[in-house]
Image (cartoon, coloured by chain):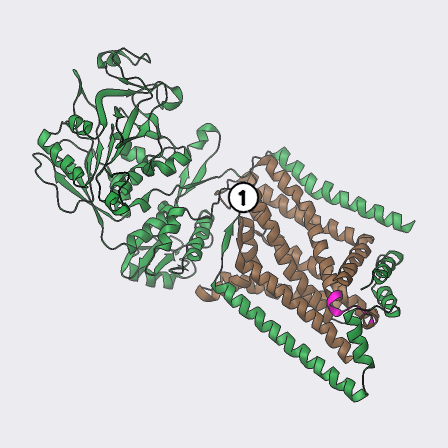
Chain colours: A brown, B green
Amino acid sequence: MRAGWAICKRELRSFFVSPVAYALLVAWLLCCGGNYGFVANIYSSQPATGGSDNPLTMFFGGTLLFFLPLLVFIPIMTMRLLAQERAEGTLEALLTSPVSERAVVLGKYGAALIFWAALWAPTLIYVWITSRFGDVDLGVVAASYVGVLAVGGFYLAIGVLMSALAPNQVVAATMTFLLLVLLFGIGIFQFMAFDLTRDVFSYVSIWTHMQDFAKGVVDTRALVFDATAAALMIFLAIRTLEWRRLTS
Amino acid sequence: MSEREEEELESGAESSSGEASSSGEAQGLARSHGATEDAEEKKGSKSEGSEDEGERLRAERKLYTIVGSLLFTLIVLMLNYLSFRHFERYDWTRDTRFTLSERSTEVLEGLDRDVQLVLFFSSGEPELEDVLELVQQYESASDRITVRQVDPLRQPAEVQQLAQRYDVDLAQTRDGQTVTDAAAIVIAGDRRWKITRDDLTELDLSGMETGAGPSISNEAESTFTSAILRVVSGEETKLCVASGHGEWGVGEGERNLIALRDELERENFAIETFDATGLRRLPEACAAVLVLGPLRPWAEDEVKVITDFVDEGGRVLLALDPLVDRRGVTPTGFERALGGYGVLLDGAIFFEPAPERMLQPDPTSMVLVESRPHPITETIVAMQAPTLVDLAQTVRVEGARATTLLDGSPASFGKVDLAALMAGPSGELAPDDLPGPIGVGAAVDLADPDAMADEAEAAGRMVVVGDSGWLANESLGRPDVANLMLAMSTVGWLAEREELVAIPSRESSMQALALTEDDMGGIWIRVMLLLPGAFLLLGFAVWWSRRE
């Protein structure tokens, strides 16, 4: 685990000393700010129906403006993790070092998760702004951030797997984007399906997951799905590297 | 991994450019002779045995990788199947908006047959969002509950089929959309119960006057739990309502309690009216007898039938308004009999001078009273909700069998001198008046405190309130008072249907954000300029320092 942690720290350090991280943060905050401003504008001009119909619930998953940046930023964040090493020919050297594939993948995934949390940390300011003009339920806010981490953990793991499979960053980002769009699309099918089919689509839909979390409801189904799917992606990423070592 | 290796790894990062890859780390580590298991494993696979042996090992590892991946995938699928079938939904909201009350949980735990909730909701009904969430809690709380949602807009054929099967009325809007009169149906076997949209949510505008803004009252839990009880409980509980002395009626008529009747019928009560003039015996199988606001006194023999009923384990609700005429308060006929149970009707008018308890400038009519701790008032006391009474007579208690249920503020008292009262309301206590705080309601339980539970359940119970206006349709419909909850809890306690002790509604404000145009401008500046700008500056500073 120490090797994994060292790789994680190294990844974060190399990321935060480059202007890329800040460019990404600025772009991210512009997207989130636009989403929040849009939501605040709606709730300032029309009454809510009460209960779960409130600005922060809508911000965290109530509109497409929440999900679209996810589909774009996660491929960008994860594309370089392993694909860059492979494109530069350093992956083979890394795999022949006394660092296990598991440590490499977990270290890089951990760094991506921490950066994901860092992207969301400034959005706490929106909670503070909302509390100045209306009522904020901190339980709902906590559940929303748990949801953001759970969904982010799953999507980042997909990015890590694609980065392990792809020959270069561009292919990794494209594959991740397409897979995320496909998953998001499958979730959308819940609105067209009925009964059991709807329940199944709803089970894998991050739209449903985030709507629950944003209402203040923590559903074990969403947590189990996100955690196990992320674990599977990470496991497969490790096995991909192992396979590559065995076949090289 | 050794400390040295870790240091090498980190120093590689520091010496490299911002976009450094892990090659420095890998090469540094390859040079070192770390003794980790991974290293041993890799070294072993490369150095051990002949080339054939190496190939064999390699083939084995490939097989392990494939089989391991398949097994792991299978485990993940199984875990998700289990999670799909058995799940929990934790409510983190401050007011536990989506947590079922203890009463509902008890009802769900006691279910001995399957219950289906069919919801006729469209996805675009925001006011029903919380209702949908609550219904999922029912499903999560009991394996006996299944929920089926059909959308009238997108599944008209299915809605039509269900409507035909369950007698739901359908209508077409001008734009051809199908709408139903029921928002949901609760079904258990061949029994079913219809729920309308008005039963689920109610708009409350009373906050407009105080500046708190309008709110929505979510009655869904009370409605669904009652409906479930109604369809699963076999026999209806019979309530016998007395008439013949000018009492309130439960049918159509000038002086009626239709709101109370509707609520009781929703809770699976059957109401039978009987003529109490010259009463000799009560109708058969009355779970409770209700005497609601007689305008003329009862005769001694008639009262005796009621008290005998109570002594034999019967249950009675007496809502006895003061019978006021020019001479003063005329006895209702129950005074002497009630004295035997420790309930004193003194013929005094309840006088509440505390301004915060008066809804109009008259200390005798439309005043708020407070509930005292009792199984009937458990929820109401917790909510600190007042009850509205209208020209009540005082009810005092003595002895251990009677308990005060409702009383006034410390300043309240019983006005005996009606001549002074008629001359004009005065807050002064006359020598004959009854000092406060004074009650307007009492509960009597004839069970021996040391008796076993089944004996206690067989003992008589009685609730006496010195007013019947608290049961009037207008009073039960007011969301700012607890009259409806008190009425249902009282009947529930009397008829041993204590699961009916009312489930409070959930209020939520409709005013999400109080923003002016200037505020909105400030928000745009903060979220689109200041916050991203701060990180832009930070990034520039990092780039500048790295460049130097």
Q: Is residue B530 above or below residue B167?
A: above
Question: In this figure, which residue is indicated by the disc labeled 1?
Answer: A54
Residue B377 point in image, percent of width and height: 34, 36
Residues B6 and A229: in front is: B6
Residue B78 point in image, percent of width and height: 54, 70
Residue at image coords 37%, 57%: B117
In the picture, measured across the screen, residue A5 lies left or right of residue B321, that is right
Disc 1 residue type? Asn
Q: Is residue B315 above or below residue B387?
A: below
Which portion, as a residue range, is magenta?
Answer: A97-103
Residue B179 point in image, percent of width and height: 37, 54
**Residue A100 inside the magenta-drawn segment:** yes
Residue B420 point in image, percent of width and height: 25, 11
In the picture, measured across the screen, residue A19 lies left or right of residue A116, that is right
Callout 1: residue from which chain? A
In the picture, measured across the screen, residue B333 lies left or right of residue B153, that is left
